């Protein structure tokens, strides 16, 4: 009995410590380069148990939702397609599913699944995070040009770092930077700055995009909340009804 009590005494304090997110060596290397480029406190010290939820908006309509948990993709869904259909689809980057109006889940197979994934990737190019990024890290709240923003670090598959700053007031992207170069010569390029105004319906629309090249986007990504949490890495990446079917199929 005594050894058990001693073990509890030793390990109990450790359980109260906040959990740090484990980051791949590649992501850590990219962020270290960012620290050299811009100076300041290491973002690695701030990466803990954060949950970020948001909406994908097209004008007045919410066309999808997203969630980032502990710097990893957990759950991406599209609630409404631009063609007016209201099927509820989702993907975790590995499987695609449909939830009917009766709440019954179906995992998509074959061509239907491939068509959906293709539609998803086309419509949400910036949200296809598992394809483009090895990590997404939350680096806390900052002030840029007198505006409070949430800073998200996207570590790209090609070793670039993309910093995206979302307004704490509107939730919308207001600035994007890319960190490029070598260990010796590192550069910070401002790739986009956005300003927003309200249209006649009261909806925020993009007024100007500094340094933005290419076609304008009809979709904006809006952060709703950033908060700490104590969820474990075992949390379902898909709705429970979908997880049940997936587990049955894997037997």
Image (spheres, rainbow, N blue to C red):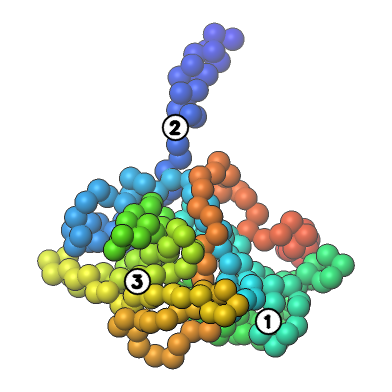
Say which quadrant the C terminus sits in: bottom right
**Residue under the point 45% across and 28% down:** 14
Residue 135 seen in the current view? no
Label 2 CA crowd tier, 10 Å (few <14, some 14–19, many 20+): few
Pick the residue in front: 193 or 37: 193
Q: Which residue is mark 3?
A: 176
User: Residue 157 appears at what percent x and percent y?
Assistant: 38, 72
**Residue under the point 59% across and 10% down:** 1
User: Residue 146 appears at what percent x and percent y?
Assistant: 31, 60
Pick the residue in front: 144 or 178: 144
Q: Kindly report which numbered mark, 2 or 3, lies closer to the viewer in this rendering.
A: 3
Q: Quadrant of residue 231?
A: top right
Label 1 CA crowd tier, 10 Å (few <14, some 14–19, many 20+): some
Q: Quadrant of residue 54?
A: bottom right
Q: Are marks 2 and 1 in contact (CB under 8 Å)?
A: no
Pick the residue in front: 28 or 207: 207
Residue furthest left as drawn: 184
Above or below residue 46? Residue 136 is below
241 sits left or right of 171 in the view: right
**Residue under the point 30% across and 77% down:** 191
Q: Which residue is mark 1?
A: 81
Q: Earlier in the sequence, mark 2 or mark 3?
A: 2
Q: Which residue is mark 2?
A: 17
């Amino acid at each position: 009995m005594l050894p058990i009590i001693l073990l509890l005494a030793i390990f109990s304090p450790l359980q109260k410590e906040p959990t740090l997110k484990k980051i791949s060596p590649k992501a850590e290397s990219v962020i270290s380069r960012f620290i050299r480029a811009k100076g300041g406190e290491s973002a690695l010290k701030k990466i803990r148990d954060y949950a970020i939820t948001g909406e994908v908006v097209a004008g007045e309509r919410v066309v999808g939702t997203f969630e980032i948990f502990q710097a990893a993709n957990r759950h991406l869904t599209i609630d409404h397609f631009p063609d007016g259909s209201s099927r509820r689809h989702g993907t975790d980057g590995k499987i695609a599913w449909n939830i009917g109006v009766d709440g019954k889940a179906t995992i998509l197979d074959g061509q239907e699944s491939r068509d959906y994934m293709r539609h998803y990737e086309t419509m949400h190019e910036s949200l296809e995070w598992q394809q483009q990024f090895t990590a997404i890290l939350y680096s806390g709240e900052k002030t840029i040009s007198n505006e409070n923003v949430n800073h998200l670090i996207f570590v790209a598959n090609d070793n670039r770092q993309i910093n995206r700053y979302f307004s704490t007031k509107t939730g919308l992207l207001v600035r994007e930077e890319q960190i490029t170069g070598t260990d010796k010569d590192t550069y910070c390029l401002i790739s986009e700055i956005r300003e927003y105004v309200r249209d006649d319906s009261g909806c925020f629309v993009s007024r100007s995009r500094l340094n933005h090249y290419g076609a304008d986007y009809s979709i904006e990504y809006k952060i709703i909340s950033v908060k700490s949490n104590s969820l474990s890495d075992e949390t379902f990446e898909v709705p429970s009804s979908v997880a049940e079917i997936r587990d049955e199929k894997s037997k």
